[in-house]
Image (tube, helix red, strand yellow):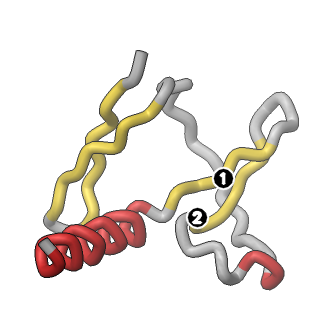
Amino acid sequence: MSVVDVVSSGELRVGLVVDQVIGDHQTVIKSLSRLHADVANFSGATILGDGTVALILDVAHLVEFGQVREESQRAAG
């Protein structure tokens, strides 16, 4: 079952469809290395308590990407 997670980016509120919400955690976010500089959808990563790595979404970039895509689809259609 999917869940919609509502997030804010500036003055906008958007819904992200996610498979599962694991929980609410305070975490230290580390920047991605220069090797991953072209990965625009993620702002960093963190190491979870069990040792696995979790990528941190760049919500502002995702919202901007969605707006540009929607505008181009409207112009084409």
Q: Which residue is mark 1?
A: 55
Marks 1 and 2 sit apart, C-alpha to C-alpha, by: 7 Å
Residue 33 % position (x, y): 80, 77
Is there CB contact under 8 Å for labels 1 and 2?
yes
Q: Is residue 58 left or right of residue 76?
A: right
Residue situated furthest front in the rendering: 77
Q: Which residue is mark 2?
A: 42
Q: Amino acid at mark 1?
A: Leu
Residue positioned 74% across, 71% down in the render: 32
Front residue of 23/35: it is 35
Residue 57 vs 17, above or below: the answer is below
Q: Amino acid at mark 2?
A: Phe
Residue 26 % position (x, y): 57, 42
> In what element is the residue under mark 1?
strand
> In what element is the residue under mark 2?
strand
Lower sequence index among marks 1 and 2: 2
Where's the N terminus, which quadrant? top left
Residue 71 % position (x, y): 17, 76
Q: Is residue 26 left or right of residue 63?
A: right
Q: Is residue 44 left or right of residue 40?
A: right
Residue 12 disc label: none
Residue 27 vs 73, above or below: the answer is above
Residue situated furthest right in the rendering: 51
Q: Residues within 10 Å of mark 2 (few under 14, many from 20)?
A: some
On the image, which quarter does residue 77 sit in?
bottom left
Residue positioned 82% across, 80% down in the render: 35
